[in-house]
Image (cartoon, grey):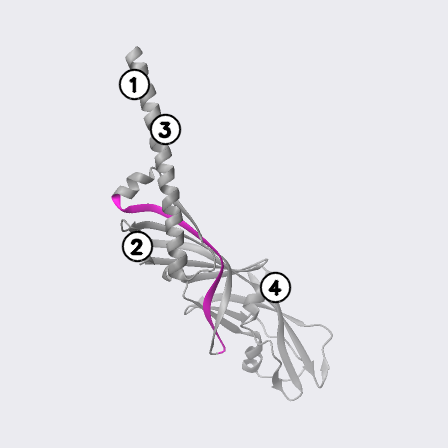
Amino acid sequence: MRALRILLIVAVILGGLFIAADRLAVNFAESEAADRIRANEGLESTPDVSINGFPFLTQLAGGTLDEVEIGIKDFDASGRTGGAASTIRIDALTARMSGVGFTGDFSSATADSASGTARVSYPELLKAARVEPVELGPGVEAQVVGLSDGGNGKIKVAVEATIMGRKLPQPISVLSSATVRDGQVKVDADSLPDFGVPIADDKIREITDFQQRIGDLPAGIELDKVEAAPDGVDITVKGSDIRLVG
């Protein structure tokens, strides 16, 4: 019995040491991966990296991690507005990578698949809209002056209009749908505003409808879906066969 107790004590001690070593190793790997991603993507700040699954050392020996979560704040993605190159600030980008294979020195890493979300604020998305006055017809000018949550997944677009030299006392509100098409966030009015004078629909849509391209996301992640939220639009992202670093 005494020998059994000794064996149990030794097993507990060794198990504790293994767990401690495992946690130290995963913390080092997370820090190293975060630094590599920051350098590879040219980020302003170091991202949050979490390596899930236990034990880590077993995954490390096999050269593949079950799941890695990455969180990036205030990321400047490339965009295109009105045919001109631009940047668009993403408030927060989170991605969950599965089946992450890597080299021993962490100089190269790829993931089988990824999914996540990105948040773009309404003031940032507003940069893609026609915020300068546009002549819609004789004596009629209009411009977008604000974006906000319209409820039920819609974006409320505030359009300010001047008719025959007189500015309307209140902006006209238009509920719009947001979709992802060809790597762009597209905002299209569900119904067009009435300015009280005949104006062609396609002319009005030059004001109400707009799009924002979001490119060069980390690791080649692509846009999937978009939905209006209280503080901005939430964009679902996804990808497969993703090169994280190297």
Of label 2 and label 1, which has the lower sequence position? 1
The answer for how far apart the CA atoms under marks 3 and 2 are is: 31 Å
The answer for how far apart the CA atoms under marks 2 and 1 are is: 41 Å
Residue assigned mark 2: 107
- Mark 2 crowd level (few <14, some 14–19, many ≥20, 10 Å Cα): few
The furthest residue to the top:
1
Q: Position of residue 86 (x, y in %)?
A: 48, 73
Q: Position of residue 117 (x, y in %)?
A: 46, 56
* Residue 216 visible at all: yes
Q: Is residue 44 above or below residue 23?
A: below
80, 196: nearer the viewer: 80
* Location of residue 171 by image quarter: bottom right
Residue assigned mark 1: 7
Which residue is at 55% across, 77% downward?
Answer: 205
Q: Is residue 133 left or right of residue 93?
A: right
Which residue is at 35% across, 30% downward?
Answer: 17
The answer for how far apart the CA atoms under marks 4 and 3 are is: 53 Å
Q: Position of residue 52 (x, y in %)?
A: 38, 43
Which numbered tag is attached to residue 148? 4
Q: Which residues are magenta?
A: 62-82
